[in-house]
């Protein structure tokens, strides 16, 4: 039983990526200084950290490949660490693969971004938790079955990058190991393989309703050369980041998967005021350029898709005390985003190289972005057989953005509303028939930022709504399948800064409420996922240190599919897990 403590909750150095209400006068990063030992924790050190997800349905592994271990100390500006990869021996039969990313750290360190690539294709984007003197550890488990076409390759390279800096102050070295666990799921009941219905195996946030068919036959990475990671470091909208790809002439389906994370002055893009606010108030911060950001995908200069990403908060973000030991949604397994390019296959099916370009509208330094082009090929049409395709309608994307700002001195408000709507269609004639794919997409983005009390209080309200409908029609015009995918990401955040005359300290009050809502419907069946986190806390900040503070995080996780439900309710207070209840009972409504 946990005993409530009256003394302020304290931890060894904790770094804080500051969302300053008044960015001019406060440093961007803070950390926790050594005050009192964190001795009241009910679990002996080191302490486990978690991102709440649902368990994977796999039971007995066929085999396990420990592939990678490395201690990431001073790795900034270095290339990723690479090891050879080959699939397990033939006596290990497998249909599914789970990547285990284990990490531990002790000392003082910032949250860091990391990724795993296989043969240059990203398979995991993750970030680290901030360590304590007692040490912390965590595990990320991700179903990577959709990368099977790479996982079967021999003599390729597994690369892991984690940009870290170690010196007198930042002592934390991240110890990382990566293991692949192979399962033969043919024996598991309730899971149909290779069927067209959504496969309930896919478990993490990014999986629900993504590539729902059998894994692609071929994956072409759209990534950088690897000298400094395979991701593109996007510093502005105008840069040319991307790669030329040539696809096989017998491809009949194409989906681009995109990984993103935001850093530096854009780490909290959703809370950035306009440049004019910063200039007029003579602020030194560069966290500006308003709050509209959109990831854009172009083929040879034609916009073929876009999305507004879920605002993942890293473990040092807003108030680092929120994220102990339960991290922010997506922090350990950042979502990737899919754009169905099947209607555009005509453009790609000509044996020529086409430039797939990744960009972030209105971005400031910097974003880490790369992608994988998943391709399915017609097995009954062996090369040099050619699949025919034609774009019927490039759509006339409707795009509308309204931005307004009004401020006097440090007080004021900023609003952005963006809507994008498109409908594209094209047919592809393969041995499965002449199928027409229609992709309709609508994205709505709303953001409002308000500053009060001479800029010391900041409120951010944001919502992202995205709806994608993919219909597949036979050549006689009959609808063969219709998939609807809805995603909603509401966010509400308040930070108050109460300066004190003593010792240059200030009291920061912080609240965050954010959600990931997702629903996918195919025909009559549907899958839904709702993840909500409500966090509230305070901290006393001095210079770069968080001197003391307290925080609570409440999280609910509700998943429902055709087979059943999974729900989990978790609460953490002052660094300790208070409640963690999981249930597989289906609630009446979801
Ligand atoms: C967390 O710590 C703060 C500050 O010491 C305290 O006021 C609060 O009651 C604590 N909360 C819980 C749930 O222990
Ligand atoms: C496969 O064969 C190797 C070498 O003969 C053996 O070490 C391993 O245990 C076998 N694995 C399985 C799953 O049978
Ligand atoms: C990863 O962490 C889990 C949980 O702590 C542990 O069971 C597993 O053995 C670890 N795997 C490796 C390869 O260290
Ligand atoms: C992989 O490398 C091994 C050892 O160098 C070699 O024997 C094998 O033929 C290679 N496999 C392929 C598919 O290149
Ligand atoms: C799957 O089931 C078959 C038949 O029951 C059995 O022989 C085989 O060992 C099982 N495979 C695995 C990986 O459990
Ligand atoms: C900003 O700096 C300019 C030039 O130094 C000065 O005229 C102006 O009053 C300053 N504005 C504010 C709000 O401090
Ligand atoms: C459509 O594809 C099938 C299978 O590849 C092929 O037999 C047929 O000739 C194609 N139709 C046209 C009009 O090209
Ligand atoms: C508002 O904040 C600025 C910057 O900290 C300060 O210079 C100014 O005096 C404050 N104004 C009031 C009315 O408190
Ligand atoms: C495929 O179907 C579309 C629309 O029904 C039609 O316009 C096109 O000619 C067909 N293509 C082939 C190769 O039959
Ligand atoms: C201010 O700092 C001094 C010297 O570090 C310390 O003795 C004093 O207790 C501090 N006051 C407060 C209120 O923290
Ligand atoms: C924790 O769970 C217990 C019973 O399981 C319940 O009585 C209590 O209210 C819960 N606390 C929170 C903060 O949800």
Image (cartoon, grey):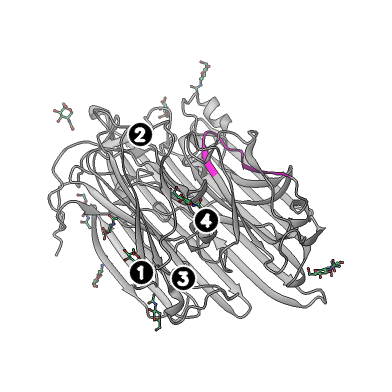
- Label 3: which secondary element: loop
Return the residue at label 2. Answer: 29
Return the residue at label 4. Answer: 150
Task: Ligand 3: give its quadrant.
Answer: bottom left
* 354 falls in the magenta region: yes
Is residue 574 visible to us here?
Answer: no
Q: Nearer the viewer, mark 2 or mark 1?
A: 1
Return the residue at label 3. Answer: 201
Return the residue at label 1. Answer: 61
Distance from disc 3 to disc 1, alpha carbons, whole Å, reads 15 Å
Q: Which mark is residue 427?
A: none
Distance from disc 3 to disc 2, alpha carbons, whole Å, reads 39 Å
Image coordinates of residue 132 in percent, x first then y, are 22, 44
Q: Is mark 1 within 8 Å of ligand 5?
A: no
For the N terminus, the image quarter is bottom left
- Label 1: which secondary element: strand
Q: Earlier in the sequence, mark 3 or mark 2?
A: 2
Image coordinates of residue 180 in percent, x first then y, are 38, 58
Q: Nearer the viewer, mark 3 or mark 2?
A: 3
Q: Earlier in the sequence, mark 4 or mark 2?
A: 2
Q: Which residues are magenta?
A: 353-369
Q: Earlier in the sequence, mark 4 or mark 1?
A: 1
Mark 3 and mark 1 residues within 8 Å of each other at the beta carbon: no
Distance from disc 2 to disc 1, alpha carbons, whole Å, reads 43 Å
Residue 520 vertical position relative to residue 10 in the rendered view, above or below: below
Distance from disc 4 to disc 2, alpha carbons, whole Å, reads 39 Å
Q: Quadrant of residue 571?
A: bottom left
Residue 171 vertical position relative to residue 328 in the rendered view, above or below: above
Total numbered labels: 4
């Amino acid at each position: 039983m946990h005993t409530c403590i009256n003394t302020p909750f304290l931890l060894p150095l904790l770094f804080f990526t500051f969302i300053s209400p008044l960015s001019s006068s406060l440093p961007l990063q803070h950390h926790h200084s050594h005050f009192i030992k964190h001795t009241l924790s009910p679990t002996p050190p080191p302490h486990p950290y978690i991102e709440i997800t649902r368990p994977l349905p796999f039971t007995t592994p066929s085999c396990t490949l420990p592939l990678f271990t490395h201690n990431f100390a001073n790795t900034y500006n270095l290339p990723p660490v690479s090891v050879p990869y080959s699939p397990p021996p033939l006596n290990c039969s497998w249909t599914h693969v789970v990547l285990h990313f284990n990490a531990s750290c002790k000392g003082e360190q910032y949250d860091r971004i990391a990724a795993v690539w296989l043969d240059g294709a990203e398979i995991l984007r993750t970030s680290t938790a901030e360590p304590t003197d007692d040490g912390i550890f965590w595990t990320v488990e991700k179903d990577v079955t959709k990368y099977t076409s790479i996982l079967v390759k021999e003599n390729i390279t597994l690369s892991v990058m984690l940009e870290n800096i170690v010196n007198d102050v930042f002592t934390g070295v991240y110890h990382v190991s990566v293991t692949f666990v192979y399962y033969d799921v043919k024996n598991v009941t309730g899971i149909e393989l290779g069927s067209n219905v959504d496969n309930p195996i896919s478990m993490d946030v990014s999986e629900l309703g993504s590539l729902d068919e059998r894994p692609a036959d071929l994956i072409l990475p759209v990534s950088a050369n690897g000298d400094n990671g395979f991701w593109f470091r996007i510093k502005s909208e105008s840069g040319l980041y991307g790669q030329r790809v040539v696809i096989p002439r017998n491809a009949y389906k194409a989906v681009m998967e995109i990984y993103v994370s935001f850093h530096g002055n854009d780490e909290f893009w959703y809370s950035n005021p306009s440049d004019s606010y910063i200039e007029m108030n003579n602020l030194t911060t560069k966290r500006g350029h308003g709050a509209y950001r959109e990831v854009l995908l172009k083929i040879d200069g034609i916009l073929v898709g876009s999305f507004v990403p879920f605002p993942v908060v890293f473990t040092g973000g807003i108030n680092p005390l929120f994220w102990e030991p339960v991290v922010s949604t997506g922090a350990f397994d950042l979502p990737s985003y899919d754009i169905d390019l099947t209607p555009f296959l005509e453009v790609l099916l000509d044996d020529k190289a086409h430039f797939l370009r990744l960009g972030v509208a209105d971005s400031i330094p910097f974003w880490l972005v790369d992608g994988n082009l998943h391709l399915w090929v017609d097995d009954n049409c062996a090369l040099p057989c050619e699949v025919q395709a034609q774009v019927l309608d490039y759509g006339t994307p409707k795009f509308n953005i309204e931005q307004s700002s009004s401020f006097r001195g440090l007080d004021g408000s900023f609003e952005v509303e963006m809507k994008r709507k498109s409908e594209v269609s094209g047919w592809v004639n393969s041995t499965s028939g002449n199928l027409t794919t229609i992709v309709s997409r609508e994205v709505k983005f709303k953001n409002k930022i308000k500053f009060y009390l001479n800029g010391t209080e900041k409120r951010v309200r944001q919502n992202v709504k995205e709806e994608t409908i993919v219909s597949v029609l036979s050549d006689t015009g009959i609808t063969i399948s219709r998939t609807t995918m809805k995603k909603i990401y509401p966010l509400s955040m308040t930070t108050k800064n109460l300066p004190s005359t003593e010792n240059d300290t200030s009291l920061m009050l912080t609240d965050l409420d954010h959600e990931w809502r997702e629903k996918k419907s195919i025909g009559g069946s549907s899958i839904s996922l709702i993840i909500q986190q409500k966090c509230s806390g305070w901290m006393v900040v001095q210079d770069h240190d968080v001197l003391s503070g307290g925080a609570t995080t409440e999280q609910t996780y509700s998943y429902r599919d055709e087979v059943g439900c999974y729900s989990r309710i978790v609460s953490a207070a002052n660094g300790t897990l208070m409640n963690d209840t999981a249930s597989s009972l289906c609630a009446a409504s979801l």
